């Protein structure tokens, strides 16, 4: 049952952050590593219809500050079944921010 139609991540400078797993509308867990203290996550719902939004840690704000170590980011998007949004589906990102000592 698909939820996201696209997904990308950029660091503070706008450079692409490589997501370790290949994107699929069915995948619910992703990881990536960045040295940046802030990322921008671009995620579009599988069907881009008015009223359906993607949220990041409970907010529509897609610019996310990162702390040292692992950062969990919860993305929720409409879950589509038989051409209708049924409920929100959770996609988990565990970002590892590089810091001193890495």
Image: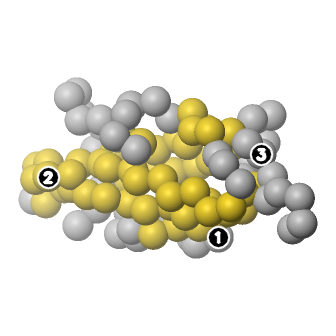
At x 68%, y 39%, the residue is 38
Mark pair 1, 2: CA separation? 27 Å
Q: Which label sits on residue 36?
A: 3
Q: Mark 1 points at which residue?
A: 20
Picture coordinates of residue 71 (x, y %)?
57, 57
Q: In this view, does 102 lie above or below 68?
A: below
Residue 59 sits in quarter = top left
Question: Measuring 62% from the left and 63% from the top, which residue is drawn there?
Answer: 70
Of marks 3 and 1, the one in the foreground: 3
Secondary structure beneath disc 3?
Answer: loop
Residue at mark 2:
87
Left or right of 80? Residue 37 is right
Q: Which of marks 3 and 1 is nearer the N terminus?
A: 1
Q: Which residue does the image show at 81% across and 52% down from the upper left?
A: 35
Q: Which residue is at the front of the view, 61 or 81?
A: 61
User: What residue is shown at x 75% (from left), y 35% (from top)?
Assistant: 12
Earlier-in-chain disc, 1 versus 2: 1
Q: Nearer the viewer, mark 3 or mark 2?
A: 3
């Amino acid at each position: 049952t698909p939820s996201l139609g696209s997904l990308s991540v950029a660091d503070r400078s706008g450079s692409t952050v490589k997501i370790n797993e290949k994107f699929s509308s069915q995948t619910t867990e992703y990881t990536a590593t960045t040295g940046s203290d802030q990322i921008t996550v671009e995620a579009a719902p599988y069907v881009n219809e008015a009223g359906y939004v993607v949220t990041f840690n409970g907010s529509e704000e897609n610019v996310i500050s990162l702390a040292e170590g692992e950062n969990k980011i919860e993305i929720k998007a409409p879950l589509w079944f038989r051409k209708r949004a049924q409920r929100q589906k959770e996609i988990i990102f565990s970002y590892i921010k590089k810091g001193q000592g890495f």
